[in-house]
Amino acid sequence: MGYPEWKDLTLQLRRNFFRAVGGFDNERALELINKENYPAIFQMCRDLDSARYHRFLADAFLPRVTTDLYQGFLSALRKVSPLFVLTTNVDEALESQMPASVTVQKSDFSRCIDLLHSATREDVFQGIQIGCVLYD
């Protein structure tokens, strides 16, 4: 869909804050980038200027034109029943293509377990968990 990968997004965020926000610790940011500790940079920027941080993310993830590859992905998903999708990012493009889905935000993630237990073959469920790391 043309969205930036973690490293590229982090580099763009660092550049944005380095140029525009007084008190931004560029040396610390570069150190964190070298360690691939991207979440720490995002938190650092959010703490420093939350309005700029949220504006940056909103601009970075504006809706994009749907590609043929993504349409194929959506077509394949629609054939799965019941469909359960858990993403590690805000996937509003997916959510908008699955209007019959139940969307569960991070703040209500425990609801996913109830939905899984009560699911029928006709159910469609999309759980969105931001920054989720799952372990077996």
Image (cartoon, rainbow, N blue to C red):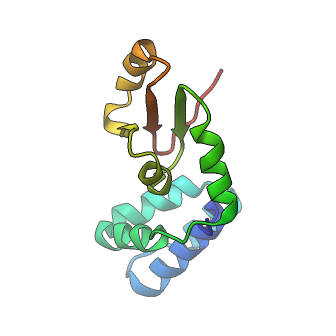
Q: Residue at x 47, y 52 (%)?
A: 97
Residue 126 point in image, percent of width and height: 46, 37
Which quarter of the figure is the N terminus placed in?
bottom right
**Depth order, front residue of 118/50:** 118
Residue 38 point in image, percent of width and height: 58, 57
Query: In the image as oriented, which residue stretches furthest toward the top?
Result: 117
Q: Looking at the image, how many numbered discs can be counted on the residues?
A: 0
**Depth order, front residue of 98/46:** 98
**Depth order, front residue of 5/126:** 126
Using the image, determine if residue 125 lies above or below residue 30: above
Asked whether, in this view, residue 132 is left or right of residue 119, the answer is: right
Residue 129 point in image, percent of width and height: 46, 40
Using the image, determine if residue 12 lies above or below residue 84: below
Quarter of the rendering containing residue 21 = bottom left
Residue 68 point in image, percent of width and height: 67, 64
Query: In the image as oriented, which residue stretches furthest toward the bottom?
Result: 19
Q: Residue at x 67, y 53 (%)?
A: 72
**Depth order, front residue of 133/103:** 103
Q: Residue at x 35, y 61 (%)?
A: 47
Q: Residue at x 47, y 87 (%)?
A: 19
